Each structure stands twice: as structure tokens, then as C-alpha cells.
């Protein structure tokens, strides 16, 4: 079945009802940010240093979570070359914001679901940011469980509060596309609507939201079917058509003024098994920088071509001998794939070949054009390590437009600033202070009024009904104000009102 076509999908980049924002977002600047991985810190900083004027922010990809939930610092042995690099970046007005990354779903859940461990992690991150003079922090927690969602939201709110008004909280999250495209031609799983990220909460807590719009591979079954029906192979790093679907869907909950599109600079090599009837299984072997692909193409005499996803690619058979001289002449980039398809159809069998696909400077220009057309805040590039297409720096010349943005002010509990509640509220009350009450209750998953519909986050109302009554009772018990059977239970009286107003 098609849903099993893509095997061993690469985890490279992983290591390495509210207003609908999609229609009317206007940004006053265009940001260009990028990650520099710790495993290539020397080459990454050397390569990026002369081009800092083309960026608005750099992200040292250096911190991960240890098994005890504290930070592991991959720069702890030797802060060079980061120290000098950061100083130059700051002198040019470029933000320096390191990334804290983890892809261990069990570890993430155990840390974030434990209020004390979560508090300790927040304090450690805040101390790190302030001690080293960073401009903020980027949180990249991937492969989370669905049950971690509310704990992750609480962590972001608490972290933003701890960072204060002068520091940025950047959030790097996984992408989504419409369910009907994701599971096109297959049975939609019953849990297809369960996610580990609360996009509305992330939009509220984070100053910027970076969409990991790469490692696409076979996730969009509808687009795969459409492209392969033309006879073209389709297992890209990031197809602009897929990226546009991602932005259009996720901008329903995330403001485009905060949104940055992730742009890859690396490629994949696949072992592709072709079966009769133009059926392909893509087994990803590894990721690579462009400098890996070009010598192979030269050795085989192949001229790479551009596919409909805007990436360069070519196919070939077998392994290469280390002493084989380059082949003179031009071999078709799609020759191996065509031969495999012919063989499979004639013999009702299968044949395996290799396919390399990767983005270059022209691919990046497509993503920049797309980001501007869609009206998002900018792009975030993974990665700058000295191995990307060097022509990318030419493409980035003059793209970034700084607008003097500052981080949003943190608000206790993640509630939007509102006037304080000044009167007694009870079931049947109507007014804007009821809406404020609902916002406060919705800022905590344990007192949330509703998961969707009227009263849910982003859809607070001005009417105090049964759902609000139930939520305020939970609030009173949680904060030790009053409990069932006692006077004032379910009513916003003086003690409850005082506590609620501390969240404004």
C-alpha cells in the first residue's frame, strides 16, 4: 500500500476557535535566520561570519536535554568559536539565540509533566540566557507524545514569563497538512486529529514560530500521487507546493507575523525500488551536503536536472569504485530510473537504483519568493555549516529587512492583558470581565473551559454559563480558595477575584 512506500525516513533535521490569520497578516520586515550546528561549529561560524549582514538572527544549535532533564552544553569544553562569533554578530545588530533541542519523547514528557523538573529546566534556561548574554532561546522539542501537549504549553508560558520582556522566545515545531492530503488513498487513522502541539498556545507564548518545513519525503500522499502520475519520482526534501499547504493550514492558528518557514540546505540519497506499474519504495540512506553529490555526478558523467519540487536530482545504478575516473560525455539524470521502470514492467519484477535529491541557491530563492507571497515573517535556514551551496549567500543579499521588532511582554499565565475584574461574577453574569475570566481560566489546561467551540481558547465569550461555572470551581479548588460545600463555591467573590487578577 502507498502508506508504506517510504521507509527509514531520515531524522536528520530532527537532530540537527481563534482568529484565522491566513488572510490579512502584514509584516513590516522580513527576517532571515539560520542554525549553525555544534558538530560543525568551526566551519559554520567561519562560513557565516562574512555574511552576518544578510541575517537578522543566528542560532547556535548547541544545547540538548540530559536524562535528568537538565541541559547538556555542547560548547562547555571550549566556547570558541562561539564567543568571538557572537560578539561580532551582536555588533552588527544580529540576534544570537541558541537552540535547546530534544527528540526523546519519553524524556520530554517526564520532564515537562513534573512541575518541579519543569520549573528547574525553566530556571536553568533563563540563567543560561542571562549569564551568557544571549538575546533569547529557541525551543525545539520534537516527537512529543499527544499527552505532553498541555505540559509543553505550560512550559512555554512559564519560560516566556521567566525570560521577561527583553528576551526572545523562539519555538521550532513540526508541520501539519490537511488530513485528506496526508492520508490520501488510505484509511484515515482514528487518532489523525491528535497532536502534540497546541498551536494556539504556542502562538500566544512564542515571539516567533519556526515551521520545520523540510524532511517532507512522503508525508503528502496526495501530492505524491499527482506527481508520480506524470512519471516523475517524488521524495523531496521540501516541495514548495507542500510548504504552501503547511502555511495555509497552520496560519489558521499561528499569526503570519510570527511565522518563519524552515528552509533546508541538505539533500538525501535513496535506494529506490521500482515495481511494475510505476510503483516506488524510497529507502533513505543518508543525508548529505551538495559537495557530496557533485563528484558522484561528475564521475558518472551525469548532468543533474531540476525536478518539479525545484530541487536538483539524478539517478544511477550500483556502487562507485574509489579509483574510477570521471566519465566523459553526458548521461541522462533520469536514465537509471527509466531503465528500472522498463525492466519492472517487462518482467513483472523490481529493480533497485540510487537517487540523490538536494536544494541549491535557486531552490532557496523559490522559498524566499513563496514566503513573501504568503506574507509570513521570514525564513529560517537549516543549516549553515560551510557545506551548503555557496551561491546561497548571493541569493540572500538584500533579502533581510529589519524592522526594529522587540519581544512581546510576558503575561502571567499567558493571558492577554485585560482590565482587572472588579465585581462579583456568577452564573448568568454578562460582560467583558466575563471574557477576561474565561481567558484566565483557559490559560491553564487544568481549568480550561472547553477544548473547542464557544468558551475555548480564542473563542471566549462574555457570558457566564455552566462551563464557566465548572471551570471556576476547579480554579478555586486548585488554588485553595474554597471547595464544594463551602460558601462562595462557584462564585467569583473577593478572594477568588484577587487571585484571578494576579494572572493579568
Image (cartoon, rainbow, N blue to C red):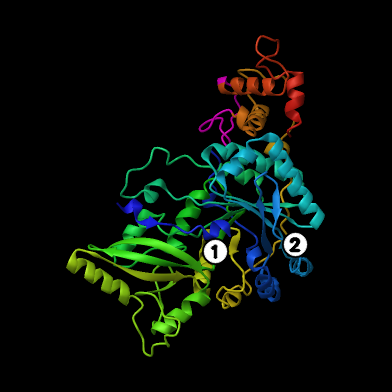
Q: Is the magenta stretch mostly helix, strand or loop?
A: loop
The vertical placement of 259 against 120, above or below, is below
Measured as percent of width and height from the top left, residue 212 is found at: 54, 56
Seen as rendered, the residue at the extreme bottom is: 328
- Tag nearer the camera, 2 or 1: 2
Q: Is residue 449 left or right of residue 345?
A: right
Determine crowd level at label 2: few under 14, some 14-19, many 20+ residues with C-alpha closer than 10 A. Answer: few
> Which quarter shows the C terminus?
top right
- The residue singled out by tag 1 in the image is 263
Residue at image position (18%, 67%) is: 347
Give the x, y percent position of residue 420.
75, 30
Q: Is residue 465 magenta?
A: yes
The tally of labels here is: 2
Residue 72 placement (x, y as % from top left) = 69, 53
Q: Can residue 421 be seen in this view?
A: no
Residue extent of the magenta highlight = 449-466
Q: Residue 410, how many percent across, how many down?
A: 73, 43
Q: Which mark is residue 1?
A: none
Amino acid at each position: 500500500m502507498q502508506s508504506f512506500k517510504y521507509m527509514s525516513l531520515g531524522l536528520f533535521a530532527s537532530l540537527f476557535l481563534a482568529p484565522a490569520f491566513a488572510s490579512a497578516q502584514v509584516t513590516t520586515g522580513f527576517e532571515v535566520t539560520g542554525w549553525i550546528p555544534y558538530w560543525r561549529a568551526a566551519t559554520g561560524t567561519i562560513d557565516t561570519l562574512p555574511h552576518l549582514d544578510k541575517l537578522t538572527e543566528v542560532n547556535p544549535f548547541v544545547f540538548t536535554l540530559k536524562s535528568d532533564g537538565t541541559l547538556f552544553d555542547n560548547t562547555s569544553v571550549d566556547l570558541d568559536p562561539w564567543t568571538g562569533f557572537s560578539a561580532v554578530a551582536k555588533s552588527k545588530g544580529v540576534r544570537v539565540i541558541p537552540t535547546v533541542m530534544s527528540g526523546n519523547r519519553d524524556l520530554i514528557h517526564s520532564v515537562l509533566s513534573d512541575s518541579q523538573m519543569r520549573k528547574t529546566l525553566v530556571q536553568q534556561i533563563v540563567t543560561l540566557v542571562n549569564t551568557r548574554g544571549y538575546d533569547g532561546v529557541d525551543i525545539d522539542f520534537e516527537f512529543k507524545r499527544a499527552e505532553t501537549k498541555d505540559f509543553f504549553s505550560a512550559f512555554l508560558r512559564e519560560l516566556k514569563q521567566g525570560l521577561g520582556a527583553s528576551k526572545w522566545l523562539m519555538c521550532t515545531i513540526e508541520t501539519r497538512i490537511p488530513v485528506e492530503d496526508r492520508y490520501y488513498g488510505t484509511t484515515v487513522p482514528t487518532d489523525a486529529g491528535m497532536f502534540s502541539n497546541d498551536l494556539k498556545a504556542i502562538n500566544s507564548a512564542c515571539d516567533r514560530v519556526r515551521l520545520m518545513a523540510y524532511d517532507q519525503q512522503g508525508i503528502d500522499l496526495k501530492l505524491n500521487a499527482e506527481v508520480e502520475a506524470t512519471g516523475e519520482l517524488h521524495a523531496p526534501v521540501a516541495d514548495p507546493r507542500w510548504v504552501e499547504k503547511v502555511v495555509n493550514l497552520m496560519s489558521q492558528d499561528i499569526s503570519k507575523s510570527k511565522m518563519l518557514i524552515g528552509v533546508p540546505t541538505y539533500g538525501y540519497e535513496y535506494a529506490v525500488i521500482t515495481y511494475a506499474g510505476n510503483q516506488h519504495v524510497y529507502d533513505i540512506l543518508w543525508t548529505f551536503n551538495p559537495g557530496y553529490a557533485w563528484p558522484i555526478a561528475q564521475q558518472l558523467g551525469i548532468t543533474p536536472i531540476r525536478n518539479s519540487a525545484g530541487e536538483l536530482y539524478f539517478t544511477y545504478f550500483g556502487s562507485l569504485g574509489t579509483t574510477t575516473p570521471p566519465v566523459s560525455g553526458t548521461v541522462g539524470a533520469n536514465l537509471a530510473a527509466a531503465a528500472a521502470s522498463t525492466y519492472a514492467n517487462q518482467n513483472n519484477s523490481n529493480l533497485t537504483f540510487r537517487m540523490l535529491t538536494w536544494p541549491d541557491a535557486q531552490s532557496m530563492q523559490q522559498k524566499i519568493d513563496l514566503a513573501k507571497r504568503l506574507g509570513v515573517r521570514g525564513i529560517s535556514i537549516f543549516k549553515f555549516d560551510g557545506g551548503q551551496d555557496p551561491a546561497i549567500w548571493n541569493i540572500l543579499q538584500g533579502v533581510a529587512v529589519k524592522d526594529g521588532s522587540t519581544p512581546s511582554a510576558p503575561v502571567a499565565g499567558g493571558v492577554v492583558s485585560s482590565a482587572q475584574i472588579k465585581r462579583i461574577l456568577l452564573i448568568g453574569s454578562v460582560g467583558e470581565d466575563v471574557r477576561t475570566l474565561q481567558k484566565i481560566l483557559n490559560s491553564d489546561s487544568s481549568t480550561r473551559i472547553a477544548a473547542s467551540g464557544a468558551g475555548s481558547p480564542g473563542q471566549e465569550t462574555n457570558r457566564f454559563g455552566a462551563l464557566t461555572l465548572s471551570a471556576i470551581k476547579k480554579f478555586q479548588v486548585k488554588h485553595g480558595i474554597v471547595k464544594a460545600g463551602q460558601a462562595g463555591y462557584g462564585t467569583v467573590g473577593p478572594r477568588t477575584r484577587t487571585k484571578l487578577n494576579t494572572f493579568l
